[in-house]
Image: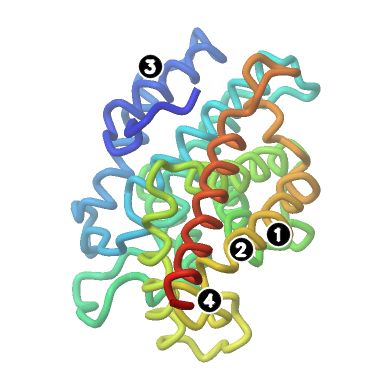
Amino acid sequence: MVQKDLTNDPTAVATQVQAAYLAMFPQADTRFVPLAFGWALDCFCGHYAGYQAVDTRYHDFEHTLQGTLCMARLLHGRHIAGAQRPLPRRLVELGLLAILLHDTGYLKKRDDTKGTGAKYTVTHVQRSAAFAAQLLGQKGSDQHDIIAVQNMIRCTGVDALLSTIPFQDDLERTAGRALGTADLLGQMAADDYVEKLPILYAEFAEAAAFTKDRTHLICLFTSADDLMQKTPIFWEKYVRMKLDREFGGLHQFLKSPYPDGPNPYLKRIEANIERVRQAVAAKRQSNSR
């Protein structure tokens, strides 16, 4: 069940992720989840050498926690459903590391004083993959694990094509699909998703001014109102299709109870999309007066 305001508390999220992790692997190292969260918290709070604290207001640390909690729930749901080809413990661990680090590409270096990390929107996936390789290399991860984390991170861009990602095996692809699913669902199911859409537009606008790629998705919106108007179409014509097709329908493992119960994430998103429609309609009515 999606709990209100849980994701603004890293300790509360880590506790739930730990519970899901140990439910899947009772004999696992209880230090792993706290360690992984500690690494991510250091990065986003400006305690990683050479980098500032995150300064993006939409893609903040809570955004990362929203995705991380959703992914832990999804992987746990898949595990208890007895899905064939279960993910081994190490791959689940790498998946959690990947989603905790998937937006580190928004972080700015210490000497980067212009604008916010939002200017890196177009390149943030590549930057996140490079950042993860640097961090995990320093922590002693081997090359196979680093590549796995990078491949999973590459599943999170809005323009990501999974067919072009060089997954090392099918299970790694499944973990990447889970990460991409959780990244989309976690943010769109948030209680304040509708209120934060203007903030998302501000990030897009900053990035559009910074990039030379005028064909990128971020350049398609002319205002916060325009983004709001296009959000229901984005959900219906892009996100749902991506979830069901490219990401293999893994969102089904969030159903409670599985397999016939409701999916609390999808229910929350549908409610948010309805709120967006109502806000757009109210704005049109106001402008017509």
Identify the mark at residue 218; answer none if there is no mark. Answer: 4
Closer to the N terminus: mark 4 or mark 1? 4
Closer to the N terminus: mark 1 or mark 2? 2
Horizontal side, residue 154 vs residue 132: left or right: right
Contact check, label 4 and label 1, Cβ < 8 Å: no
Disc 2 residue crowd, few under 14, some 14–19, many 20+, Cα 10 Å:
some
- Helix, strand or loop at disc 1? helix
Mark 2 residue type: Val
- Helix, strand or loop at disc 2? loop
Q: Nearer the viewer, residue 75 or 49?
A: 75
**What residue is shown with label 2?**
158
Could you tell me residue 68's position as x and y percent? 46, 38
Q: Nearer the viewer, residue 262 or 245?
A: 262
Depth check, mark 3 against mark 1: the one in front is 1
Mark 1 residue type: Tyr
Closer to the N terminus: mark 4 or mark 3? 3
Q: CA distance from mark 4 to mark 1?
A: 15 Å
Q: CA distance from mark 2 to mark 4?
A: 10 Å
Q: CA distance from mark 3 to mark 2?
A: 34 Å
The image quadrant that residue 230 belongs to is bottom right
**What residue is shown with label 1?**
238
* Residue at the image position 52 percent from the left and 11 percent from the top: 23
Identify the mark at residue 95; answer none if there is no mark. Answer: none
Contact check, label 3 and label 1, Cβ < 8 Å: no
